[in-house]
Amino acid sequence: MKKLRVAYQGEEGAYSESALFRYFGEQVQSVSCVDFPEVFARTIAGETDYGFIPVENSTAGSIHQNYDLLNQYELYITGELFYKIHHCLIGLPGTTLEDIKTAISHPQALAQSTTFLHEHHIREQAGLDTAGSVRVIKDQGDKSYAAIASARACKVHNMELLAENIEDFKHNTTRFLAIHKNPLEQNPEMKNYKATFIFSLPHYPGSLSTVLAGIAERSFNLTKIESRPLINKPWEYIFCIDVSGDLPYTAYADLQTYLTSKTNSSKLVGIYPSAQTIEEG
């Protein structure tokens, strides 16, 4: 049986790869991509069955590029995962924590581990990504350097796990989305849906408040709102929203009809099951 192919941004051992295995299962084939546009391009071209992207972190906020790409590409959200991020300090085999003078990682991972680094007098050095930083220190062979990455990245590169759970905030969680060329099929038995819409508004006072009032009147809970600049139209914006509620699939589809009538343009990016739990990394 052919394996599902799932595209993600980063190298083998990246948090996105660990999260996609948690969501889809270990039996899928992960496909590493250099950047987020490549994830979308491979998925829309059918080179992979799904893409798997982070869109927000509980401490660092939204990943704006991926909201822009969701607007740009005709792909659909089919599911979400809330995944706890646990940072590890990873060194060369045979090293100890006392050997480490400098830690390399993605700037966000460094920023999320400042207390641990300061307590152990470890300098910070920004890298391109977490798993890639493990490969860098492996290649350079300097035992005074370590990387901050996932336990999976440590295992992939056969490195030394020097410290676990070094993040400042123990509830550090990233929200991931599964994206596909086709929308999720309706399940009449399910009511714990969430939906994502992207729309632009006419220029008159109260246009946004009118739309939001209409959403509330239809018994939806607004769980997120994000504004992004409208490309080639200075000082105009698109709005990205997530809504949820104890409502059937058809109610979300009907909401798209309402938004179309009240906005300049409205795109239904996906109706999908709302994640009810936070998965441990």
Image: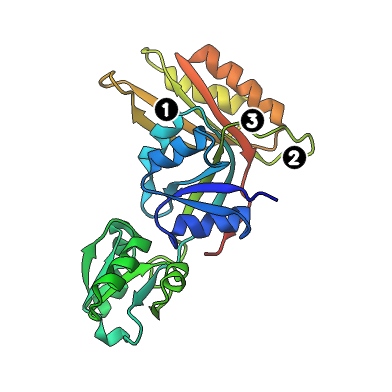
Under circle 2, the secondary element is loop
Q: CA distance from mark 1 to mark 2?
A: 29 Å
Query: Is residue 137 found left or right of 260 in the rendered image?
Result: left
- Front label number (1 vs 2): 1
Mark 1 surroundings within 10 Å by alpha-carbon count, few (fewer than 14), some (14 through 19), many (20 or more): few
Residue 223, given in percent of the width and then of the height, sits at: 52, 39
On the picture, is 182 further left or further right than 187?
left
Left or right of 279, for residue 246: right
Type of the residue with mark 1:
Gln
Residue 219 image label: 3
**Left of 263 or right of it: where is 214?**
right
Residue 194, percent from left and from top: 61, 38
Q: Which residue is mark 2?
A: 190
Residue bearing mark 1: 72
What is the C-alpha distance between the residues marked 3 and 1?
A: 29 Å
Residue 226 shows in the view:
no
Q: Is residue 87 visible?
A: yes
